C-alpha cells in the first residue's frame, strides 16, 4: 500500500514537472496590440412628414397632397412602398366651430432614406409642394454597414498587430511566429450618433404690405459621422 502511494506521488511530481516545462515554453511569446478606426456616415435617415388640409384659395385635400408627395418621391427614385410609412390620421377644428368646412384633416408619415443628399432633395421637393412640416426624426448606421466596417477593421487591425510583432521580434534577433492568442473589442463614438445639421439660406423679402416672398435655395444637410474603433490584442510565438 505504501509502495502504491509512493509511486502515485512520483507520478504526480513528473506530471507537475512536465506541465511546468510546457508552461515555460508557452510563455515564450510576444504580446502586441493594434488599434484602427474609421468614421462612418449614417445610412439610415428618418424624416417625419405632416400633411394638413390648407384653406388658402379653397381647401387642398390631404389626398391630393399625398398624391403630389408620392409623385415627387418617385421622381427622386424612392421606393415608396418600402420607404414610406403612414403613422396616423387626425383632424383639427378651426375657430372652434363644429362646422364641416372648418374641420381640417391631417396625416403624418415616416420616410426612410439612405443619404443626407437624398434627404435634402426630399425636403426641397416637398417644400415646393407647400408641404413645409418636414424634418429629421432620427439617424443611425444600418446593421449591414456596421458589420461590413467591423470586418474590414478587424482584418486591418490583425495585420497591423502582426507587422508590429515582426518589427519588435527582429529588433531583438528573433522571429515572430504564428499567433497563439487573439482578442478584440470595439467602441463607438456614441456622442456623434444621431446628429444632423440643417443649413438653409432662405431670406424673406417684403414686396408690399400684403405680400411676403421667400427666396429659397437648396437645403443642405450635414450628417455628423459616427466613429468605430477596433482594438486587437495578440500573442505571437517567438522563434
Image: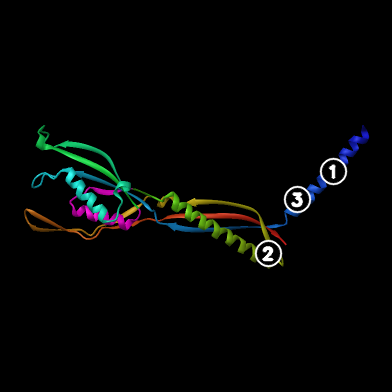
- Could you tell me if residue 94 is visible in this image? no
173 vs 123, left or right, is: right
- The alpha-carbon separation of the residues under discs 2 and 1 comes to 35 Å
The label number, if any, that marks residue 13 in the structure image: 1
Residue 166 in which image quadrant: bottom right
- The reply to whether the C-beta atoms of the residues labelled 3 and 1 are less than 8 Å apart is no
- The alpha-carbon separation of the residues under discs 2 and 3 comes to 21 Å
Chain-order first, disc 2 or disc 3: 3
| Quadrant in the picture for the N terminus | top right
Residue 119 in which image quadrant: bottom left
The residue under the point 47% across, 55% down is 148
- The alpha-carbon separation of the residues under discs 3 and 1 comes to 15 Å
61 or 195, nearer to the observer: 61
Is 21 magenta? The answer is no
The residue under the point 61% across, 64% down is 163
Residue 42 locus on image (x, y percent): 39, 53
SS at mark 2? helix
Residue 87 lies, with reference to residue 174, above or below; the image says above
The residue under the point 35% across, 53% down is 114
Q: Which residue is mark 3?
A: 23
Q: Which residues are magenta?
A: 114-137
129 or 199, nearer to the observer: 129
Residue 10 locus on image (x, y percent): 88, 42
| Quadrant in the picture for the C terminus | bottom right
The label number, if any, that marks residue 169 in the structure image: 2
Is 136 magenta? The answer is yes
46 or 76, nearer to the observer: 76
How many numbered marks appear? 3
Residue 35 in which image quadrant: bottom right
Residue 55 lies, with reference to residue 150, above or below; the image says above
Crowding at label 3, few (<14), some or many (≥20) Cα neighbours within 10 Å? few
SS at mark 1? helix
Amino acid at each position: 500500500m505504501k509502495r502504491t502511494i509512493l509511486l502515485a506521488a512520483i507520478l504526480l511530481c513528473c506530471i507537475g514537472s512536465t506541465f511546468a516545462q510546457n508552461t515555460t515554453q508557452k510563455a515564450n511569446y510576444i504580446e502586441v496590440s493594434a488599434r484602427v478606426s474609421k468614421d462612418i456616415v449614417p445610412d439610415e435617415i428618418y424624416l417625419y412628414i405632416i400633411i394638413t388640409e390648407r384653406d388658402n384659395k379653397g381647401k387642398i385635400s390631404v389626398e391630393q397632397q399625398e398624391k403630389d408627395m408620392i409623385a415627387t418621391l418617385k421622381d427622386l427614385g424612392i421606393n415608396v412602398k418600402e420607404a414610406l410609412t403612414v403613422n396616423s390620421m387626425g383632424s383639427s377644428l378651426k375657430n372652434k366651430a363644429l362646422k364641416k368646412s372648418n374641420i381640417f384633416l391631417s396625416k403624418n408619415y415616416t420616410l426612410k432614406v439612405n443619404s443626407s443628399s437624398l434627404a435634402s432633395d426630399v425636403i426641397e421637393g416637398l417644400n415646393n409642394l407647400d408641404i413645409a412640416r418636414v424634418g429629421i426624426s432620427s439617424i443611425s448606421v444600418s446593421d449591414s454597414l456596421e458589420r461590413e466596417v467591423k470586418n474590414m477593421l478587424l482584418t486591418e487591425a490583425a495585420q497591423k498587430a502582426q507587422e508590429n510583432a515582426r518589427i519588435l521580434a527582429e529588433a531583438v534577433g528573433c522571429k515572430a511566429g504564428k499567433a497563439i492568442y487573439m482578442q478584440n473589442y470595439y467602441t463607438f463614438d456614441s456622442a456623434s450618433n444621431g446628429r444632423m445639421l440643417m443649413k438653409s439660406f432662405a431670406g424673406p423679402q417684403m414686396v408690399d404690405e400684403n405680400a411676403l416672398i421667400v427666396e429659397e435655395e437648396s437645403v443642405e444637410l450635414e450628417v455628423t459621422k459616427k466613429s468605430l474603433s477596433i482594438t486587437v490584442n495578440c500573442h505571437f510565438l517567438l522563434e
